[in-house]
Amino acid sequence: MIPALLQKPLAGRAVQCRLCAHYCRIENGETGICRVRLNRDGILYSLNYDRVIAVHSDPIEKKPLYHFLPGSSAFSLAAMGCNFQCRFCQNYSISQVDPRRGPQGEPIPPRELVQSALDAGCRSLAYTYTEPTVFFELMLETAKLARARGLKNIMITNGFISAEGLDMLAPWIDAANVDLKAGSDAFYREQCGGRLQPVLNTITAMHQAGIWLEVTTLLIPGLNTDDAQLSRVVTFLHDLDPHIPWHVSRYYPQYQMDRPSTEAGVIEAALAKARDAGLVYLYAGNLPLEEWSDTRCPQCNALLIRRSGYAVTIHGLDKGKCRNCGCDIAGVYE
């Protein structure tokens, strides 16, 4: 264990964790909602700093990031834990910590993680699979070392980090994909154990900080597919920046949720609605729809990037510009 960053002592040996928007008050001997930050005698400790649960070299498109170093590999890593309890979590076996066992994993130091990324030929490190906010200390130290070695840093997140946490982290993060799970606070409270507004605040703050940003929404039939919620998501993204790529993903039954899989027509309708509203870069996830997989120039419609699964072919893109008409294509390509 190491002392956790972003903590505030309270009376009676209690402590407030200021890492995420829950701002947990944690009594002595207890953990917060994430179950990986422990109050021991009035000092908060990280339980997962040296407990790496997953490492893998992934196509960056898997994150998904379609406009950040397309075709490259990201060295993905995670420690156990999450500050949400989403009923539909795809990685629940490593995101949800059993309080009787605590976080599991192997002690892999940050320098070794960075070297492994270089040895694998990756251009970036991705903090992903679980919720990287709750392995903040590991992520921050690794990101600093990665930057010094010429690697980019990517955060795949639910966006529930505190403003203080993001202020510390933002200088070291180059790109992020944020799950904007719904356009309803009730959905966040009932299905995830969170709230909507802090996520909107994070997306806005990341964009203002110059972090390359893409957003993903998993559409679950009957829960977040109504016109009001979709309109709120689309309007928010359009007002912030219509060039933020939006990935609309198909739900499959997972964990504690057994609703039918999302029909392809629901995904296509949501993407068409977003296109009509003025969002520029739109993609379908968990569903092979050619119209919503490739990147085309918003000005002349020339094919720029062809995708088939995670296979990527760059056709008409040259240093971030369309070869056909010279239009600037939002993203990071070098």
Image (cartoon, helix red, strand yellow):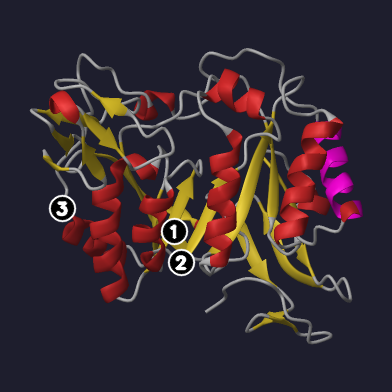
Three-letter code, disc 3: Pro
Residue 230, position in %: x, y? 79, 37
Three-letter code, disc 1: Ile
Of the image marks 3 and 2, the number of the one nearer the N terminus? 3
* Neighbour tally class for label 2: few under 14, some 14-19, many 20 plus, Cα within 10 Å: many
Residue 142, position in %: x, y? 26, 59
Q: Are marks 3 and 2 in contact (CB under 8 Å)?
A: no
Q: Are marks 3 and 1 in contact (CB under 8 Å)?
A: no
* Neighbour tally class for label 1: few under 14, some 14-19, many 20 plus, Cα within 10 Å: many
Of the image marks 2 and 1, the number of the one nearer the N terminus? 1
Q: Which residues are magenta?
A: 264-276
Local secondary structure at mark 2: loop
Name the side, left or right, on which 121 lies relative to 272.
Answer: left
Q: Which residue is mark 1?
A: 154
Local secondary structure at mark 3: loop
Q: Is residue 71 visible?
A: no
| Numbered mark located on residue 174 in the image | 2
Name the side, left or right, on which 259 lies relative to 145.
Answer: right
The residue located at (75%, 26%) in the rendering is 262
Query: Is 312 situated above or below 287?
Result: below
Three-letter code, disc 2: Asp
Real-space Cα separation, disc 3 to disc 1, in angstroms: 18 Å
The residue located at (29%, 43%) in the rendering is 135
Was residue 323 drawn as part of the magenta stretch in this picture?
Answer: no
Image quarter hosting the N terminus: top left
The residue located at (61%, 56%) in the rendering is 214
The residue located at (51%, 67%) in the rendering is 209
| Numbered mark located on residue 109 in the image | 3
Q: Nearer the viewer, residue 148 or 120?
A: 148
